[in-house]
Amino acid sequence: MTDAIKEINKFDTWILASRPKTLLAAIVPVLIGTSIVSFETKVNILAAAVALICSILIQVGTNFVNDLYDYLSGADSESRKGPTRALAAGLISVGEMKFAIVFVFVITFFLGLYLVYISTWVTLLIGLLSIFAGIAYTAGPYPLAYNGLGDVFVFLFFGIVGTVGTYYVQVVDISPLVLWSSIPVGALITNILVVNNYRDIDEDREVGKNTLAVKMGRRFSRYQYLIFMILSYLILFVVYFTFNHSYFVFLPLLTLPIAIRLIRMIFLYDGEELNKTLELTAKLSAFYGLLFAVGILI
């Protein structure tokens, strides 16, 4: 363990374990869903705030579960190419992480009951499925991330469910606009995982973590990333022509230079070089989401 790691205090350790750079993936769906509510009707500020907190907590809880079970399975080791993991670095014990997982998901559940109260039982089902999926991502008898289903989980829950669910708890309905708008959210957030799994393909294969990248190979992952990127920008034209939005809905096109740079990076970079690609992919998701939300509102 390095001296730098030893000097991290407990609070900073939990911040590290929560993986703050990934939390943008929890914010963007709520931002887009709420912007559509504002465009079509009146925003319920309290419901939107609670939905945001729950989304962030589910992301944190999922990260904690991922940290724990990747450590227990041996997927996280000193040779990993990605950022430091709290358990693998000896900063948090297994017992502490298990307690934190239970604590975070219990808080999420009770906060979510308010959203159930103001909407319907469907919200309860969405919440329970989201928590279950967050745990099943790397835990249980058939962990999603270890069986090539991580990409599907991220696209569905952090894209479709996160965006549509935010809209639903405020309007108690689902509109075609929010469904279409959830697609680029899911695609860009999934691309964060694609880069992560592409970078770790050799290490994951060695420990039996059969991500989609391991199952399908590097070439598939590169083109998966490219297709999701293209899809994200094509949806803007669907929204514009189908729902008669103003030209401002094309504001996310301002991020195209970043997207083109990232496509070049995924085709040219390897190993630890991809950490920069991972970070920039997360930032693209946030920039795109913010511009898309503004475009919908205008």
Image (cartoon, helix red, strand yellow):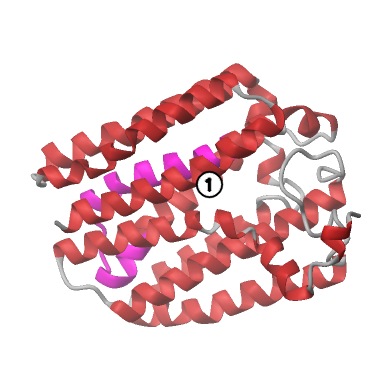
Label 1 SS: helix
**Residue 164 or 265: which is nearer the viewer?**
265
Name the residue rendered at 23%, 56% in the picture. Answer: 294
Q: In the rendered view, would you say 239 is above or below 122?
A: above
Q: Residue furthest top?
A: 219
- The magenta segment is 165-194
Mark 1: give few (<14), some (14-19) or many (20+) Cα within 10 Å.
Answer: many
Residue at 59 percent across and 38 percent down: it is 276
As for residue 236 lying within the magenta part, the answer is no
Q: Position of residue 176 (x, y in %)?
A: 22, 49
Which image quadrant is residue 68 in? bottom right
Name the spot of residue 178 as percent of width and height, x first. Answer: 27, 52
| Residue 255 visible | yes
Of residues 1 and 286, the one nearer the viewer is: 1
Residue 127: % across, % down: 50, 67
Q: Is residue 193 magenta?
A: yes
**Which residue sits furthest front?**
3
Q: Amino acid at mark 1?
A: Val
To which residue does mark 1 refer? 154
Task: Please say whether residue 152 is visible from this viewpoint.
Answer: no
In terms of secondary structure, what is the magenta stretch mainly? Answer: helix
Q: Quadrant of the C terminus?
A: bottom left
